[in-house]
């Protein structure tokens, strides 16, 4: 039996702000947790089961993504979520996230070129040069996922700490 997964409200009420995380690996991991929490909520709503259901808690990220975004019209969002998972897996299975990570570059480029077709990945191999682009890419995934969620109560969490605005 795995650890209890946080609900969306617990994550929304936490103090972390993606825009303020400086370490690229931590930024990827926190973004992944945030997206996974939203996917779990979407699946919970679709299946009409509690968000803290043990079956949902034991599902892998890609399973949640397939269930939450497997319908027509969500193909691009699904690919974007899967690419974030690839970047996260790179961190989980390597000593550190390589500056030249093709998965990281693909995740960011996929998100930003949707709005800026002329975008190119910064050539600098430093986290500081690439971090703002990653934050923008993560937010471009998180925003539409939050829009897919069904509000559960009048106090729908829209905290200013949530990464809902451009950095």
Image: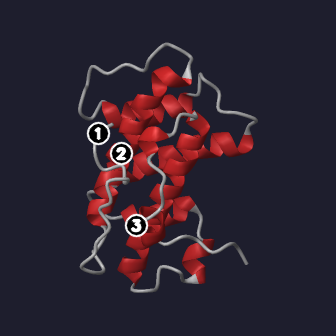
Most extreme residue toward the top is: 123
The quarter of the image holding the C terminus is top left
Camera-nearest label, 2 or 1 = 1
- Circle 3/circle 1 CB separation < 8 Å: no
Camera-nearest label, 3 or 1 = 1
Colouring mode (rainbow / by chain / secondary structure / one colour): secondary structure
Where residue 105 sits: x, y (%)?
Answer: 48, 28
Name the residue that disc number 1 marks: 166
- Circle 2/circle 3 CB separation < 8 Å: no
Label whose residue precedes the other's in the sequence (3 or 1): 3
Q: Which mark is residue 68?
A: 3
Where residue 65 sits: x, y (%)?
Answer: 46, 61
Question: Residue at 37% across / 54% down in the picture?
Answer: 162
Q: Residues within 10 Å of mark 2 (few under 14, many from 20)?
A: many
Q: What's the CA distance linking mark 2 and mark 1?
A: 8 Å
Question: Residue at 52% across / 33% down in the picture?
Answer: 104
> Measured along the vertical axis of the image, is residue 120 above or below residue 66?
above
Where residue 20 sits: x, y (%)?
Answer: 46, 39
Name the residue that disc number 2 marks: 139
Where residue 87 sits: x, y (%)?
Answer: 57, 40
Q: Specify the quadrant of the image occupied by residue 147.
A: bottom left
Question: Residue at 27% across / 35% down in the picture?
Answer: 114
* Residue 85 appears in the rendering: yes
The quarter of the image holding the N terminus is bottom right
Q: What's the CA distance linking mark 2 and mark 3?
A: 18 Å
């Amino acid at each position: 039996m795995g650890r209890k997964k946080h609900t969306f409200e617990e994550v929304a009420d936490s103090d972390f702000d993606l825009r303020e995380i400086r370490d690229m690996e931590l930024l990827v991991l926190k973004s992944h947790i945030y997206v996974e929490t939203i996917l779990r909520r979407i699946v919970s709503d679709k299946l009409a089961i509690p968000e803290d259901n043990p079956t949902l808690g034991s599902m892998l990220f890609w399973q949640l993504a397939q269930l939450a975004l497997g319908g027509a019209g969500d193909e691009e969002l699904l690919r974007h979520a899967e690419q974030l998972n690839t970047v996260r897996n790179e961190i989980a299975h390597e000593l550190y996230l390589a500056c030249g990570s093709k998965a990281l570059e693909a995740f960011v480029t996929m998100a930003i070129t949707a709005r800026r077709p002329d975008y190119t990945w910064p050539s600098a191999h430093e986290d500081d040069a690439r971090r703002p682009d990653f934050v923008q890419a993560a937010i471009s995934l998180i925003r539409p996922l939050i829009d897919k969620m069904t509000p559960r109560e009048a106090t729908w969490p829209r905290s200013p700490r949530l990464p809902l605005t451009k950095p």
